[in-house]
Amino acid sequence: MILPERVRRFPWPLEGDHYRYSVNVEAAPRAHRTAAGEWGGTVLDFHADYEAELAERAAILRRDPGRHVELPHMREAGWDALLHLLAEAAATDPAMTLSSTGDREFRWENGRLGVTRRFRVGDEDSLGESPLRFAASQVNDDLVLLDERAGRLFADAGVVTFASNWSIKFVLGMSFTDLHGPVPRDLADGAIPRAERFLLGLQPGDCYRRLNWSSTVGHRLDASLETYDEWGAERGSVGDLGEALHLRVEVQHLIRLPLTGSILFLIRTYLLPMRELVLVPAWREQFATVLAELPDEMADYKGYGEIRPELLAWLRR
């Protein structure tokens, strides 16, 4: 059987037969073989849904411009993030090019979107919008910029349209520790303080990644607090598990930007319906084993608490 492309490219998040929160970071990029295929050979991933996902982001930002937030002191870091991401994109997809045309002047071409832009770093009028907002229109990752102050990290800017049960507007200016307050067992087990110490030790140009996983009902990228009234009620009435319930995986890259030292946090979301997950027998067996062993509060946090018995029966049928 030939597996669908999104199954072959899916970033399978589980190792072993049990799961607990941890820092779980690794240097990136690095290709990973899975039971279905391969993922992770590049930082950015411009697959077949690239154009559709960016069209969805643009529509969300038109409806709710507040998904893009920045504290005033982060504009220089925004330019740093833009140059880094456009260079990364050009190195990833041959349809994209970034050329230096003079002192702090650049020309960007994105053949997949039909976009050409000439701009001068530091001059927002030449770009037509903030550099972070433009970067988010060219890559399908959500973007968060972490600023370091007095030995701590703070979420001081971001463009986030595909959040899972959180809001960039709400967390703007929060410390790294406060950001992760709702995550069960993390603070007690020390994972969050360890993660912050790790990030503070990153050197300019360093790039690492981690995976996080949860659930979504329907093929819904935007599961933010802003749209809770749309998706909250769906969690209690999943219906067809194989079609409606999706494994949601975030590939999170952490990059110490070279010019400002800010940390760029990229969040790329992948969704896989259960009917496609079970096409890979090793995934079906492992997912059922991990889900059965998961502590109750973690299962609840990841969105599997109420439906766990029904889902386990469905996976093991």
Image (cartoon, rainbow, N blue to C red):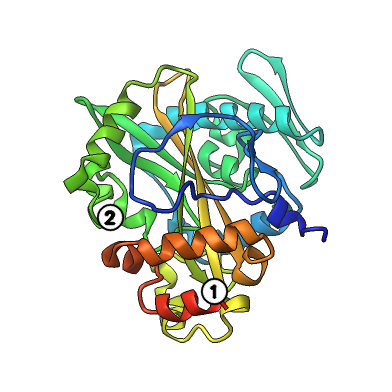
| Residue at 29 percent of width and 62 percent of height | 295
Decide which of tag 1 and tag 2 comes sooner along the chain: 2
Secondary structure under badge 2?
Answer: loop
**Coordinates of residue 15 in the picture (x, y in percent):** 48, 46
Tell me which amino acid carries mark 1: Arg
What residue would you read off at disc 1?
316
Q: Amino acid at mark 2?
A: Val
Work out which residue is located at the far left of the displayed protein and give it. Answer: 188
**Image point (65%, 54%), residue name:** 54
Residue 309: percent from left, percent from top: 41, 79
Q: Is residue 274 left or right of residue 7?
A: left
Q: Residues within 10 Å of mark 2 (few under 14, many from 20)?
A: some
Residue 102 picture quarter: top right
Place of residue 124 in the rendered image (x, y in percent of width and height, measured from the top left)? 54, 34
Q: Residue at x 21, y 40 (%)?
A: 190
Choose between 165 and 295: the one closer to the eye: 295
In terms of depth relative to the viewer, which is nearer, 275 or 257? 275
| Residue 144 drawn at (x, y percent) | 43, 42
Mark 1 or 2, closer to the camera: 1
Question: Circle 2 sits on which residue?
Answer: 183
Query: Marks 1/2: CA distance?
Result: 29 Å
